[in-house]
Image: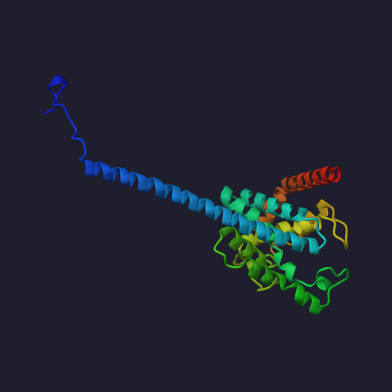
Amino acid sequence: MQIHGDLAPAITFEPAPPQTQELIEQLSTVTKDFAELLDEREQAYRMLELAHRQTLLRLTIAAEFRDDDTGVHLVRMGKLSGLLARIIGWPQDKAKMLEDAAPMHDVGKIGIPDAVLKKAGSLTPDEWSIMRQHPELGAKILGSSGVPVLDMAAEIAYCHHEKYDGTGYPRGLVGEAIPLTARIVSLMDYFDALTMDRVYRKAFPDAEVLTMIAEQSGRHFDPDLTKIFLERADDFIRMRDEINANAQSTDAIQDRT
């Protein structure tokens, strides 16, 4: 039977005994302290990850300077790789991690002697053997830290010279056995490297580079990634040009100070 209006009995709550109330307050305090501890731990982890990332990025910059680069290549590598990752549907956080990890792809070059790394002419077979050690050196430098961005960077460093048809190095991986991170970075590295001036050659025209990339679809590069990249080539060229323009503006400001 349903009871209506004034006929409904009044419901009262007895106050909790002092001991129970004290326990509730203690549990509330413990919960609050635990939440703060987790927050502090998360902040400490983020700071440690940032410190690792900054340290390795500076090592990467040192390696790039030894290879006669300006360092802007690192910025482009990160941004271009992140753009391709987003286009193929990666979530924002994973694409951002790739953006941070991609610039470390050649950190192993810091272990290559200048006589090989900076040689103006063609490398001898023995010199090529030395140069081809840099993926493994990079993976060792980045190591198995357990820090996600550095683990991704180690994977990229180790595999970014593998080729889709199995003719790459250091392990001759084929197709999808090559980590997708490395397949993305390999394509972006090729595009960026050929469209920038080097000490031993001038940049190739964009149209010529796109033709060269198309010819390497299924050989050097993942054919699916290549198709998507070529369809959106204007976006990548625009991003590259914007990064270069920003870098030139920054250099001009620094020159005046």
What is the quadrant of the N terminus in the image?
top left
Q: How is the image coloured?
A: rainbow
Q: Is residue 104 left or right of residue 91?
A: right
In this view of the protein, which residue sits in the foreground, 228 or 240? Answer: 240
Front one among 179 and 249: 249
State the image quarter where residue 14 is shown: top left
Count every numbered label the image shows and give the total. 0
Residue 183's spot in the image, x, y percent? 66, 61
User: What x and y, as percent, mark residue 6?
Assistant: 14, 20
Across and down, in percent, residue 3 comes to: 13, 25
Q: Is residue 40 visible?
A: yes
- The quadrant holding residue 198 is bottom right
Q: Which of these two is toward me, 10 or 151?
A: 10
The residue that appears at 17% across and 29% down in the rendered structure is: 11
Image vertical order of residue 201 relative to residue 28, above or below: below
Instruction: Report whether 1 appears left or right of 257.
Output: left
Q: Can the viewer see residue 223?
A: no
On the rendered image, what quadrant is the C terminus found in? top right
Work out whether 177 lies above or below 96: below
Q: Find the residue positioned furthest to the bottom.
A: 126
Which residue is found at the position 68% from the left and 73% from the top?
170
The image shows residue 186 at horizontal and vertical percentages of 70, 61
Q: Which residue is depicted at the point 62% across and 49% down? A: 86
Within the image, what quadrant is residue 196 found in? bottom right
